[in-house]
Amino acid sequence: MHICHERSRNPPITCHVDVLVVGGGPTGVAAATAAARRGDKTLMIEKYGFCGGMATAGMSGAICGLFTSGRGRKHQQLVHGFAGEFYQHLKDRQAVSEPFPFGETKLVVHEPHTWKEIADDLLLESGVHILFHSLVTEVVMNGNQLHGVIIENKSGRQCITAERFIDATGDGDLCAKAGVPYTLGRNGMVQYPTMVFRMNNVDINRGIGHPIPQLEAWVEQAQKRGYHLPRKHIYLLPSPRPGEVMCNVTSILHDDGRPIDATNAEDLTFAELKGRKMVREYERFLQNFIPGFEQARLNDVAPQIGIRQSRTIQGQGRLSNNDVFQAHKSTRSVASSAWCIEAHGNDGIFMFYLDDDYYDIPYDTLLPEGIPNLITAGRALCAEHEALASARVTAQCFLTGYAAGTAAHLSHRDNCAFNQVDVDELRSIIEY
Ligand SMILES: Cc1cc2nc3c(=O)[nH]c(=O)nc-3n(C[C@H](O)[C@H](O)[C@H](O)COP(=O)(O)OP(=O)(O)OC[C@H]3O[C@@H](n4cnc5c(N)ncnc54)[C@H](O)[C@@H]3O)c2cc1C
């Protein structure tokens, strides 16, 4: 490889904080709010100009993981804590749908712009300092401890130092830079990304609620007529806005079937370009094949390709597939979930539902191997491939993020490593 000689740079240290949160998705918003509410000087850095990550930039559409699961059961709200608090804010602003059936459980569809506003308010009210439009590109180590991060933004290249660090990048960027081992899916086979879009002017009474086999049959008919529709198992969810439907229907792979690696810029570029083309093909399909969509129009498309999975860090504990299948409970739990395993793979979507039961996500799954003052949460936590396909959803990102932020406070207060935090005290604070 050829190299270039860059002008040597000694970036200024522009800020020192107690807790530094990198990433403003559901995990980062929860983590930063939690740390600041306990009185820590907290900074949250986000590469976009708004919060939400995959929930807004990726327009994921719904909050999954709030409710109990089981065929023929009455679905109640299972988790509360920060997930319940955020859900209540969405309800107060009429920015969330009524609970909507999804297989053997329910979800709620949210309005992405209001999501961003609620995040702004929660962060500012709790005293978090926010830095948007800033990308973390490197870490600075001091022995096996993290000392700081290098950020790039319009103000130039800077170093920010902190006592405790939370990797809420979803992609495990800080962990990877700090040398924490990680995996990418099952032997590199990560779940495929989706370009999400919204259609408006839909006749909701006729357009929503078609059973999955019926939708699949319509996709097959269209395929026979020459439409290029790689995904048959599609989700059409009614948004809180009248006549609008959230369409989670596309699936992006390389032309030779290789998965998209979201830590590779060429792959991401390919996915954005292919995703936008595919949106138009599905728009045409919906208008021509699905009753109720005859007069519907493309309303908007997610600002970025939706990434379900990238790096999974090696943690001090791991959520196994059996933990989910057998609804394992843990005395060190920081979140619970009854959300299904919903693994979007090359050969379709693997689904598994718990019947009137739930599993726990232990604290140790958030602790990266080897770095005492670094913690992660959300979709980068340590889990086996299928287990992560359940634990990655928004309600659990809120809960594990809030746990990470609270743990950062306790670890800083007690001057101890993250793995020495009193988990009973942590659990008593987060109360989910
Ligand atoms: C297509 C799709 C559909 C989905 N549907 C649903 C659904 O219906 N319901 C549900 O509950 N969940 C759904 N999910 C899952 C859910 O949205 C994500 O798992 C969740 O958003 C993950 O939260 P996170 O905060 O861990 O990561 P992310 O949401 O990925 O947030 C990470 C944040 O960090 C920022 N960032 C990353 N790297 C850097 C860096 N180096 N420097 C600065 N900032 C950085 C990003 O810009 C982003 O804002 C879906 C996901 C996808 C992709």
Image (tube, rainbow, N blue to C red):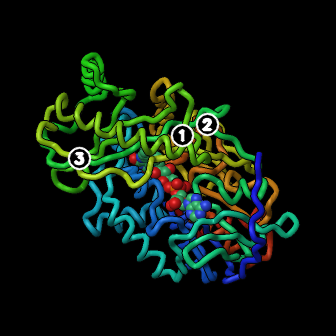
Q: Which mark is first along the chain, 3 or 1? A: 3
Which residue is at the front of the view, 214 or 311?
A: 311
Residue at 46% x, 34% y: name it.
Answer: 353
Q: Amino acid at mark 3?
A: Leu
Residue at 55% x, 38% y: name it.
Answer: 260
Percent x, y for residue 278?
35, 36
Q: Which mark is residue 385?
A: 2
- Secondary structure of the residue carrying numbered label 3: strand
Percent x, y for residue 6?
75, 65
- Secondary structure of the residue carrying numbered label 1: helix
Which residue is at the front of the view, 432 or 177?
A: 177
Relative to 72, 68 lies left or right: right
Asked if residue 30 shows in the view, the reply is: no
Kindly report which numbered mark, 1 or 3, lies closer to the viewer in this rendering. 3
The residue tagged 3 is 298
Ligand 1 lies under 8 Å from the Cβ of mark 2: no
Percent x, y for residue 289?
19, 28
